[in-house]
Image (cartoon, coloured by chain):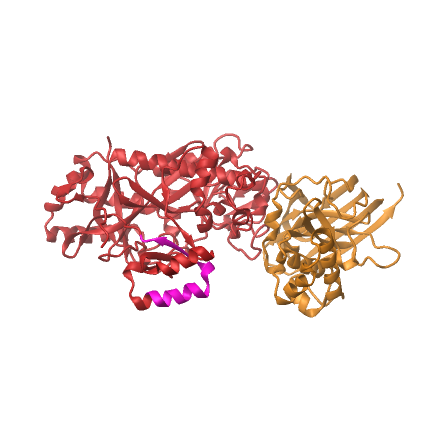
Chain colours: A red, B orange
């Protein structure tokens, strides 16, 4: 039996970050707790935020369960994390500028060329383009797990359009409304300035052709998209227009937005649409969501697109293995955040190791997401393991394997009271003229006892994430 | 040789459309085998958009036409001085890594028949000799027969049919070359129709293969040769749709008809 790091308790001792929460927890009788839980659920429903994290799909009208027990970091813990996250975001952007430029990292033999240039997310159309401030990925969502007091691992990087930040903001909002005393008694770093920092970040990468105050918009695929709530929520908080493809058009050298006062030039587009769909003239010709001609305007410096087309090549599961190498190559530093060791079943040696150690490993499909199509060896029966073994052998290239990480636990409200449950963390790093990280993020929690799968489609919930002020 | 081009594309819409956006790759490539004498592109009622050279070295020019409009004429006229470089794309400035041209696309995916075709030459010395052998094998496998394939025919479909036009020849050659690990791409351009009747299509297409030591080298299976002074190179892409000289979209629903005339003639210096 693995010992899991409990973020609140070390034996009988309460760790420093959670000192204030022990009493709070004790002071809440069961009746009050269920009352509060019902209140929280009602607030979420009224806001209209429902089930849709990370494009997992599922019932769009289902609420994602919210756990009221906060997840807490001290200022010291956070500043270490912050340095690691910013370092990684910087390296990922340097990599993108490089592989769409001279490709020095490939020439130097530090990453195989086929992983980059033959990658489905590599966009030949943007080769040679250096976006404003040299930034391709403006919002980097880095998924982290913790295994000990100082041990954090990166599960994956999200360089395109990571979602879920609306949960970070709403979770905090609702906690403050329900437990104002907690926030008076503790000095908790605010997260509500995220929309303002995001707006500043987007404005800072306006194209050179833009003189004066840049016009920023959010481009959404529309209300049927599972993250539409988040798109409109962020547009509201930033005070920018939420637009669909049909609201924008290209004329001459620029992109314009239809408004009641006539066309208005658009300088920065925060798009929540995949590359393939943003311009039918350049990518998928059948896309109805995009803006014909957008890429020509972008490529000639008439508009900025965030994230920049082509950014996806940095967050591919195979490229992930090389991120520590990027940190060394571009920044000349040792990576502060570690990768999870990963075996590629497509390689004969790795496959042999994986098949040998299957009961101890987590095996995932290369392109899978949402916690589907994966094997958690230690949590599976012999029969399940053997069935999965057959799938791997039939198509090894489709699988990667990682050691089963002993994900940390935090106290979580359950039917019987309070019990430890496993958690992960997604902070949102903003990259523009400067690199900013709001102290907090989205904590996902596996609500099922013993479960290591935090995905909301597999019984996961969310928590407010606190960073204590010094 | 001096080649004079007159290339006209007329789009007519059954109902007027609100607007049209186009992206052109209609300017001859800048490399040692071509020198522009004069070159003019006009778009009826068009507003000139952004203009830039992309990573593959192609000159891109965007246009918009504000509607309502029911007819658009794109006309390209000009003269280019050409030089026979035996297909070698010498002095062409580009930054896309050749490896990026190894990825298959829907139109250029090698099936078993194309893989078998590639296997025929896999034993040869490699490099230039292998590329010639491959282009020859493609010419043998696909008879020139206009009207049997269409703009969306894939390499595999053309291979199965055993006939097609220059686009199909180029797609099959690209698919086979990539299958052998040789970067390959689609090139669109013009070809002067010779008096001998050997050159078939004035709006023409061929393939380029990346050969170590030589760089990009053109092969035209349709005419069993490498591009020479009769060829004008416009631009390249992963496949025909990606390398299209004109890409356009009309706003507003309407049936579109397209009529193209191309004349390429040798002119006096």
Q: Which residues are magenta?
A: A385-404
Q: Residue at x 35, y 67 (%)?
A: A386
Quarter containing the N terminus of chain B = top right
Please tell me which residue lies in front, B165 or B115.
Answer: B115
Q: Residue at x 62, y 54 (%)?
A: B181
Q: Based on the picture, tell me whether residue B212 belongs to the magenta stretch.
A: no
Quarter containing the C terminus of chain B = top right
Please tell me which residue lies in front, B219 or B124.
Answer: B124
Would you say A77 lies left or right of A250 here?
left
Name the dominant secondary structure of the magenta segment: helix
Would you say A86 lies left or right of B159 here?
left
Q: Relative to residue B157, is residue A41 depicted above or below?
A: above
Residue A307 can be seen, yes or no: yes
Residue A330: x percent and y percent?
47, 35
Would you say A301 lies left or right of A371 here?
right
Q: Quadrant of residue A187?
A: top left
Say how many tags the image has.
0
Residue A114: x percent and y percent?
55, 49
Q: Relative to residue B134, is residue A196 depicted above or below?
A: above
Residue A202 can be seen, yes or no: no
Residue A360: x percent and y percent?
31, 57
Q: Residue at x 34, y 36 (%)?
A: A82
């Amino acid at each position: 039996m693995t010992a899991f790091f409990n973020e609140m308790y070390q034996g009988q001792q309460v760790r420093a970050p959670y000192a204030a929460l022990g009493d709070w927890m004790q002071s809440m009788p069961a009746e009050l707790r269920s009352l509060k839980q019902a209140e929280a659920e009602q607030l979420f429903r009224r806001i209209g935020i429902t089930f849709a994290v990370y494009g997992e799909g599922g019932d769009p009208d289902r609420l994602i369960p919210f756990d009221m027990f906060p997840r807490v970091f001290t200022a010291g813990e956070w500043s270490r994390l912050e340095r690691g996250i910013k370092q990684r975001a910087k390296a990922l952007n340097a990599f993108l500028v490089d592989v769409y430029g001279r490709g020095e990292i490939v020439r130097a033999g530090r990453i195989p060329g086929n992983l980059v240039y033959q990658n489905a997310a590599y966009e030949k159309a943007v080769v040679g383009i250096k976006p404003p401030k040299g930034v391709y990925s403006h919002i980097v969502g880095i998924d982290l797990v913790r295994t000990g007091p100082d041990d954090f691992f990166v599960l994956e990087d999200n360089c395109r359009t990571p979602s879920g930040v609306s949960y970070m903001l709403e979770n905090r909002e609702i906690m403050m409304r329900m437990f104002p005393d907690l926030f008076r008694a503790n000095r908790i770093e605010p997260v509500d300035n995220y929309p303002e920092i995001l707006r500043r970040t987007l404005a800072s990468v306006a194209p050179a052709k833009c003189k004066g105050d840049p016009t920023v918009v959010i481009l959404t695929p529309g209300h049927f998209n599972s993250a539409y709530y988040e798109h409109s929520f962020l547009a509201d908080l930033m005070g920018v227009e939420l637009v669909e493809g049909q609201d924008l058009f290209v004329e001459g050298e620029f992109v314009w937005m239809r408004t009641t006062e006539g066309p208005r030039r658009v300088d920065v587009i925060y798009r929540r649409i995949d590359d393939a769909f943003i311009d039918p003239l350049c990518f998928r010709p059948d896309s109805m969501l995009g803006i014909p001609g957008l890429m020509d305007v972008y490529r000639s410096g008439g508009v900025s697109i965030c994230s920049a087309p082509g950014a996806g090549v940095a967050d591919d599961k195979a490229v992930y293995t090389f991120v520590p190498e990027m940190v060394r190559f571009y920044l000349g530093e040792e990576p502060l955040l570690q990768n999870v060791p990963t075996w590629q079943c497509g390689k004969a040696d790795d496959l042999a190791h994986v098949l040998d150690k299957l009961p101890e490993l987590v095996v995932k499909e290369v392109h899978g997401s949402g916690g589907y199509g994966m094997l958690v060896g230690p949590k599976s029966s012999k029969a399940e393991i053997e069935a999965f073994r057959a799938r791997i052998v039939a198509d090894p290239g489709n699988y990667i394997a990682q050691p089963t990480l002993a994900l940390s636990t935090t106290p979580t409200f359950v039917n019987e009271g309070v019990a430890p449950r496993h958690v992960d963390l997604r902070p949102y790093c903003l990259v523009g003229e400067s690199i900013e990280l709001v102290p907090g993020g989205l904590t996902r929690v596996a609500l099922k006892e013993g479960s290591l799968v935090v995905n909301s489609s597999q019984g996961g919930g969310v928590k407010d994430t606190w960073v204590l002020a010094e | 040789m001096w080649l004079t081009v007159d290339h006209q594309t007329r789009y007519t819409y059954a109902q007027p459309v609100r607007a049209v956006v186009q992206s052109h790759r209609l300017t001859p490539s800048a490399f040692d085998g071509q020198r522009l004498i004069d070159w003019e592109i006009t778009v009826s009622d068009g507003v000139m958009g952004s203009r830039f050279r992309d990573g593959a070295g192609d000159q891109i020019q965007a246009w918009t036409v504000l509607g309502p409009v029911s007819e658009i004429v794109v006309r390209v006229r000009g003269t280019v001085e050409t030089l026979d470089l035996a297909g070698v794309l010498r002095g062409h400035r580009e930054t896309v890594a050749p490896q990026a041209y190894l990825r298959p696309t829907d139109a250029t995916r090698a099936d078993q028949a194309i893989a078998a075709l590639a296997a025929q030459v896999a034993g040869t010395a490699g490099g230039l000799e292998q590329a010639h052998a491959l282009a020859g094998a493609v010419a043998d496998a696909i008879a020139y027969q206009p009207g049997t394939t269409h703009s969306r025919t894939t390499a595999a479909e053309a291979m199965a049919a055993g006939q097609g036009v220059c686009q199909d020849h180029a797609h099959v050659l690209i698919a086979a070359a990539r299958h052998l690990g040789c970067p390959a791409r689609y090139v669109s351009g013009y070809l002067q129709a010779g008096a001998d009747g050997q050159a078939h299509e004035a709006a023409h297409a061929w393939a380029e293969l990346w050969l170590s030591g030589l760089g990009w080298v053109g092969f035209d299976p349709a005419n069993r040769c490498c591009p020479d002074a009769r060829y004008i190179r416009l631009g390249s892409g992963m496949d025909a749709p990606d390398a299209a000289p004109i890409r356009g979209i009309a706003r507003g629903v309407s049936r579109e008809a397209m009529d193209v005339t191309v004349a390429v003639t040798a002119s006096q210096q």
